[in-house]
Structures are given as structure tokens and as C-alpha cells.
Image: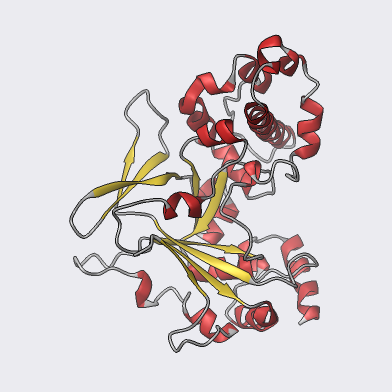
Amino acid sequence: MATYEDITKDENGDNFTAETFLSNFRRANTRWWDDSNGSNNCSWVFRGHQDASWKLVPSAFRDLEKNSLRPLIEKIKTQPTFQSEWFLKCSEEHKAASYAYTACYLAIRDFHQLSLEVGLTEELAELNDPFSLAGTNIRTYGNKEYYKFCALQIVGLAQHHGIPTPFLDWTRKPEVAVHFASQLDENSKHEDLAVYALKMGNKFTPFAPGRGPAGILKCYTRNSKGERFRLPFLMKLDAPAKNSYLAAQHGIFTLVKSLESLFDTGTCSSLEESIANMDGIEEPILKKFILRKGERRNLRKLLDREGLTEAHLKPSFDSISNFVKSRWNY
């Protein structure tokens, strides 16, 4: 059986309606719980996409030609770091990856500095000069420097406020993922939507001392034969007390296990591609549920009735105002 599965129909073989779609994602649904060993454990996490065609690729590394970091990338290309004789001899793929990683790092640093300046955070994150990293070849630092950067609390905070990062954010509450998938704007209202369910595994281990920072965990699962497999992503744990959105959304982060494919090919492999290529696991560990675009408004009405709104999941007066105005459209 494939490790990745697309699901477009309900148990009766009919296309999902808003009601039957949402029924899959009520937290008590037995499909997400494993009580075989008496633990009554839910090992699944969920993520919603407004457009079902979007891949599971972190925002910092999506389509580097159209990425929201593109204006920053164009600016940093002219920096002396990227005009060195050594760098100019690198492959175009390596150059593209270096630009993207440096731009991401710089964006996080700027977010951090301004957050400190206006008093919204007190975290003194250790962020090196991104150009010094690039100047000595980011890749020579290997994954250790990348993990150290990703472990910072400020990176998760930036992710939740629109800064592109190496993370994908997920939620332990499936109905929260449905809310984010249902969001309605000019770009998404004509598209099918999707909710992903990811089985995180049954064993999580930190890196050995000196190999990686605390808070970044390796994830493993087992097949029916008891064979253990390492999953193609890492998990990041942040303190919800320092991130109100993370707390409200019951969120966790996954990150790309390695940047090697980015430097080798100039593109970041999607999580569904990485999982689909795994052998030895007999059941899907990534499921993609797709709802037709015509059901989006009905879905939003149902979520509204259940108290799953932007105002509840991003608590602020701006969120309340945005939600009140959005309700006028359905």
C-alpha cells in the first residue's frame, strides 16, 4: 500500500459535501486514534491549504522565482559575498539555494531586531551575519548550523506572522486545519481546498550532544513487522507561552530534514514526494483530503457555528474585525 493517499470521496463513494468533509476532522473521530495498546493516543497532525494544488514545501523555499522573498533575493545578489570568484563558479542551483537561505536568514534577523526594538519580544536570539555564512559557503556548515537556526523560538514566531521560514506549521486539532483551508480570498475562491493529515510516528529522539540543538527531534515509525523507519522530516517544539497563535492553534512545526536537495537541484523536495518514495511501510502516513470549490462557503458557515474562526485562532482586535467583515460575504 502507498504511504501517501489522495481522498476525494466519502465512505459511500460520493464526492465530499461540506458536512461529510468536516465530519472527518472532528477530533473524536476514531480514524485518528490508536488505543491498541491502551494508550488512547492520537499521533496525527493536520494542515490546511486554501488551494489543493499547493505542495507541502516550506514558504522560504517555494518556487524561488515567485517566492515572496524574491525582492530581498534580488537585493542581496549584488552583495560582495556573492561576487567572489569562488561563488561565481558554483552551479546555478547552488547559487539559487544560497540566495534563498540567506534571504530567509536575513528576514528572520530583521524580524527579530525590530521585535526587540518595539518591545514585543525579549528573546536575545543568536543570529550570525547571514552574509558571513554565505561567504564561507553555507553548505560547508552542514545541517548543524541550519538546525541551530531553526531551533530558535523567534523563527516559529516569525512563521506565524507571515515571514517565510523553513517550517511547515501543523495543528493537533484537525478542525483548526479545516479552518485555514477554508479561507476565502480572490486567489483561493475558485480553487478546490485540501487538508493534509500526517502521522508523526511513534518515537521521537533528540540529536546526540553536539550534533543538533534541543527542541529539534528526529521522528520514527514502525511497520507491522516491527521494523523501524526514520521519517523524512524533523519536528520542532516551541513554548506556547511565548507564541499566542501557537497556543490557540495547538500548533507544532516540521522542517526539511536536509537542505542537500535544495543545493543540488535548486528546488526543495515536497514532503509528499519524500513520503511517497519511502519503502517498507504498509499503510498511508500522509493523507490529503480534497473538497470541491463549490462547497467552500458552506464549509465556512459550519466552522462559524462551531466557533472556529480567525478571531478564535488568531486572537486580536484586528482578527475580530477581519472576521466580522468576512462574514458579510456568506
Which residue is at the front of the view, 163 or 266? 266
- Placement of the C terminus among the 4 image quadrants: bottom right
Tell me: 319 left or right of 218.
right
Asked if residue 265 shows in the view, the reply is: yes
Q: Residue at left 78%, top 19%?
A: 79
Residue 179 vs 119, above or below: the answer is: below
Q: Residue furthest top?
A: 85
Give the x, y percent position of residue 310: 67, 66
Residue 182 vs 253, above or below: the answer is: below
Residue 49 vs 154, above or below: the answer is: below
Q: Residue at left 55%, top 50%?
A: 168
Asked if residue 252 shows in the view, the reply is: no
Give the x, y percent position of residue 146: 52, 30
Q: Residue at left 57%, top 70%?
A: 178
**Coloring basis for residues:** secondary structure
Give the x, y percent position of residue 7: 49, 73
- Placement of the N terminus among the 4 image quadrants: bottom left
Question: In which quadrant of the rendered view does residue 180 lie?
Answer: bottom right
What is the total number of numbered labels drawn onto the structure image? 0
Tell me: 76 left or right of 139.
right
Give the x, y percent position of residue 187: 77, 64
Question: In which quadrant of the rendered view does residue 200 lie?
Answer: bottom left
